[in-house]
Image (tube, rainbow, N blue to C red):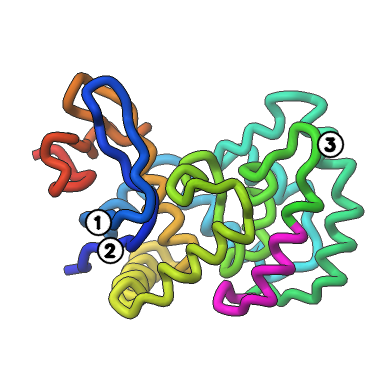
Amino acid sequence: MTSNIELKKVNTWQWTGSRWKKHENQNWTIKDPLEKIKSKYNKGTSLIFDFYVFNYSSRFPQEISEVDINAADALIGANISAKNIRWQNVIDSLDEINETLEKSKLPGCASIDDEDNIEKAANLIKKFRRDEIGLAIASKILITKQPYLIPMMDSVVQDCFTSDDPGKIMKEFKRLLSDEETKATVSNIIKEVKEKYHFEVSPLRILEQLIWFDWNLLRHHDEIFYVSGFEEWIFNYKKADLGVHRKS
């Protein structure tokens, strides 16, 4: 059995009767983390994306290819191809980004535990950002090269940490993963994933997916919310201590 994960001092939400209200620096308990990861991998394209990243793409950390861009676009909703100008801006930026990647000399297993790595990654993300390429797209592409250092930073993750600053968000992930109980639980999940799906995912990717799962809520009716794309997982704001849980 895998323990719950306690996220300390992150953004949480409280339903006020008509809207969500943010509460900063609260604790949030992620219930049944292993079952949530299995749900993500058994439904949708996260499994294919992670299999590609951890078995192939991250072995070549100095060069982003059009295959990496297509993987982010088609498999994890980067929506790069939604606009021609967006796609072209990504393609046009590749030479500059790959040159920066090469100069950074970051190995494919560069860890978020190293503050210098975080600074290099934040600078890399900032170089990538331009018209039509925001933090979500930049991070979803760059995770194909640095999955132990760069998390996906879509709007859900940004809401959790109340920031769109990549350096700050990465430092928050580092802080959470330095907790011994969290580290042990995530490590157990990684072992289970390797046994069931035959690849070894990073602690960062596990935690980021769990944050996405618990924060990506859509309203069902006044009291009940469900996880987008996973209607069997719900959150009842009147029973908040249950967290996001599977419908009985």
Of residues 174 and 37, the one nearer the viewer is: 174
Left or right: 99, with 32 as reference point: right
Alpha carbon of mark 3 to alpha carbon of mark 2: how far? 39 Å
Q: Which residues fall within the magenta stretch? A: 110-124
Is residue 246 covered in magenta?
no
For marks 3 and 2 on the same chain, the one whose residue lies earlier in the sequence: 2
For the residues labelled 1 and 2, say whether their Cβ atoms are less than 8 Å apart.
Answer: yes
Mark 1 lies on a secondary structure that is strand
Of residues 115 and 82, the one nearer the viewer is: 115
Amino acid type at circle 2 is: Ile
Q: Residue at x 59, y 64 (%)?
A: 147
* Residue at which label 2 appears: 5
Amino acid type at circle 1 is: Thr
Mark 3 lies on a secondary structure that is helix
Mark 2 lies on a secondary structure that is strand
Q: Residue at x 58, y 59 (%)?
A: 168
Q: Residue at x 45, y 70 (%)?
A: 175
> Outermost residue, left direction?
248
Left or right: 203, with 138 as reference point: left
* Residue at which label 1 appears: 29
User: Depth-wise, is mark 3 or mark 1 nearer the camera?
Assistant: 1
Q: Is residue 168 above or below residue 140?
A: below
* Residue at which label 3 appears: 89
For marks 3 and 1 on the same chain, the one whose residue lies earlier in the sequence: 1
Across and down, in percent, residue 196 comes to 34, 64
Across and down, in percent, residue 135 comes to 65, 45
Q: Is residue 48 above or below residue 176?
A: above
Asked if one can make out residue 201 in the rendered structure from this viewpoint, the answer is: no
